[in-house]
Amino acid sequence: MIIQSQKDVTPVVLDAYKNIADPRLREIVAGLVTHLHAFARDVHLTEAEFQLGCQIVARMGQLSNATHNEVVLMSGSLGFSALVCLLNNGNNGQSETTANLLGPFWRMNSPKTENGGSIVRSPTPGPELFVDATVKDQNGNPIAGALVDVWHSSPEGFYEQQDPNQADMNLRGQFTTDANGHFGFRSVKPAGYPIPVEGPVGDLLRAAKRHNFRPAHLHFLIFKDGFKTLISQIYDPTDDRLETDVQFGVTRALIGDYIRHDGPGPAPDVKGEWYSLNQPFVMEVGEARLPKPPID
């Protein structure tokens, strides 16, 4: 069909891709074309704005490398990552879930650690944190033998890849749930931290007069055959940026019960201020699959 006006463009493009063999790919491409064209019409996108948009997309790719992913950062900053997560968990968006964003700092092959062991692998000053967690299925039955990756930032707000003063794999560990679905560990209380703002994400945040901080949280990735891999973040309720997370990751189900204590702690060397966290996780039946680490 020869295009005669702007009204002809969308049906012509949809017709051109109707023979994609894979039905799911065909559905996605058709939806993308339909909504992308509708967006251009809705805002009456100018040629100059279109050219600028292409430059922004190209720049995100140019800034993405082995240590930084601007595309993932932008997706989170637009709330798109959070939306996709919530659409695909909690019974496909119908109920609360402890699923959350993977984030850019997950690494494979964290050190295997005994339950109750410490993941502090180099001197890391800060309040001690003791975590007790349980993993259950949707019927409330404990899940034994699940592999649990834990990682988080330091009390200064740095992951160990960012901080030459931290040992490799500091504040990281892999645990296995026991017969009661339990695992636990000792660490230090994490702090919130800023995301990078040197690229298009920073330009967007400055235009919106938004800060670039994430509230303090612990990361968890729970893997067990027969269950959908659960990726989670548990947030500190005292963080003053909880309601303005730059990545829109905080949900009510993910605000943890971090309890402050003063005095003797669970270990003989713990005195003064320390924290405890008791956290339940629920896994859904599904495919056990590990994600690709966002950065090397």
Image (cartoon, rainbow, N blue to C red):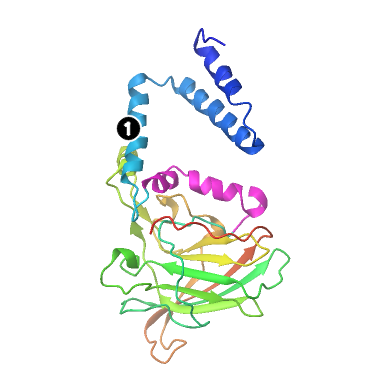
Q: Which residue is tagged 1?
A: 55
Look at the image and tell me whether residue 69 can be seen: yes
Queried whether the magenta region covers residue 87, the answer comes back as: yes
In this picture, is 172 found above or below 17?
below
What residue is rendered at 33% in x and 65% in y?
161
Residue drawn at 54 percent across, 27 percent down:
33
Instruction: State which quadrant residue 160 falls in.
Output: bottom left
Depth check: 218 or 286 in front?
286
Q: Which residues are magenta?
A: 70-97
- Across and down, in percent, residue 65 comes to 34, 51
* 122 left or right, relative to 258: left
Q: Residue at x 52, y 57 (%)?
A: 291
Q: Is residue 286 left or right of residue 220?
A: right
Residue 275, compared with residue 91, is above or below; it is below
- The 10 Å Cα crowd at callout 1, few under 14, some 14 to 19, many 20 or more, is few
Does residue 280 lie above or below 263 as drawn? Answer: above
Magenta segment, prevailing SS (helix, strand or loop)? helix
Quarter in which the N terminus is drawn:
top right
Helix or strand or loop: what does disc 1 sit on? helix
Residue at 34%, 36% in the rendered image:
58
Image position, residue 30 (x, y; %): 59, 29
Which one is in front, 18 or 238?
18
Residue 215 x, y percent position in the rendering: 40, 59
Residue at the top extreme, as displayed:
4
The C terminus sits in image quarter:
bottom left
Q: Amino acid at mark 1?
A: Gln
Question: Is residue 236 magenta-colored?
Answer: no
- Any part of residue 94 in sight: no
| Residue 250 position within the rendered picture, expressed as x and y whole percent measured from the top left | 49, 55
